[in-house]
Image (cartoon, rainbow, N blue to C red):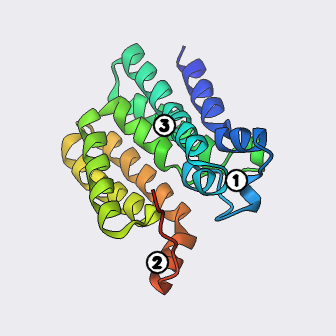
Amino acid sequence: MLVALILTSLILGSVPFGLIISLRKGIDPRLTGSGNIGATNVARSVGKWEGLVTLLLDLSKGLLPTYIALKTTNNETFSLISGLLAILGHCFSPFLNFKGGKGVATSLGVILGVKPELAILALIVFAIVFYIKRIVSLSSITATVVTTIFGLFILEHTKSKLIMAIIATIVVLKHKDNIERLIRGTEPTLKL
């Protein structure tokens, strides 16, 4: 059962929903905008509706395996491991030559499955930063860091805290190019 959960998490996380949705519209998001398959670039390159669907599907990739693992095992750490595998699948998809998205929506799904209050905090922080700056990457990075800091106090087990820190590290590192553009002041804003 545990092996099945692990494999399901990894495989589900690896499905590039943003690419699939975009290709149905005849657009390859890897060749437009930031070149990313995540919701923000899909929204910019294909359309807001497609971006929203990508966001919800990528969030579900993290939420479903994490929630199922938590309900099946009642083990916070194992559920976070399932979520981490989904994030790794998303960020380094074997279907995309081990490339992929930045893991923000999938990570939010994982947090929602384990500690919904942390997911609410992440959304609030994201919304505040986005309202002020209108920059998705800055909002995502800030929400990730703040949520992780709070998670270190809220999560019950040391291993869970370590996994949370690993997830945050992956998300921040996947934003390396965005961070460079933020430093240069060239990171694009997103108009709603």
Circle nearer the N terminus (3, 1): 3
Q: Position of residue 81 (x, y in %)?
A: 46, 35
* Label 3: element kind: helix
Q: Quadrant of residue 169?
A: bottom left
Crowd class of label 3 (few under 14; some 14 to 19; many from 20; radius 10 Å): many
Q: Observer-nearest residue: 72 or 16?
A: 16
Residue 163's place in the image compared with 8, above or below, is below
The amino acid type, in three-letter code, at marker 1 is Lys
Which residue carries the number 3 mark?
Answer: 59
Crowd class of label 2 (few under 14; some 14 to 19; many from 20; radius 10 Å): some
Which residue carries the number 2 mark?
Answer: 182
Residue 151's place in the image compared with 67, above or below, is below
User: From this viewpoint, which residue is outermost toward the left?
Assistant: 153
Q: Residue at x 61, y 42 (%)?
A: 50
The amino acid type, in three-letter code, at marker 3 is Leu
Which residue carries the number 1 mark?
Answer: 99
C-alpha span from label 3 to label 2: 25 Å
* Label 2: element kind: helix
Q: Residue at x 31, y 47 (%)?
A: 123
Q: Residue at x 53, y 71 (%)?
A: 178
Crowd class of label 1 (few under 14; some 14 to 19; many from 20; radius 10 Å): some
Q: Which mark is residue 9?
A: none
* Label 1: element kind: loop
Q: Observer-nearest residue: 78 or 15?
A: 15
Q: Observer-nearest residue: 18 or 81?
A: 18
Q: Is residue 6 left or right of residue 191?
A: right
Circle nearer the N terminus (1, 2): 1
Residue 53's place in the image compared with 4, above or below, is below
C-alpha span from label 3 to label 1: 18 Å
C-alpha span from label 1 to label 2: 22 Å
Q: Quadrant of residue 51?
A: top right
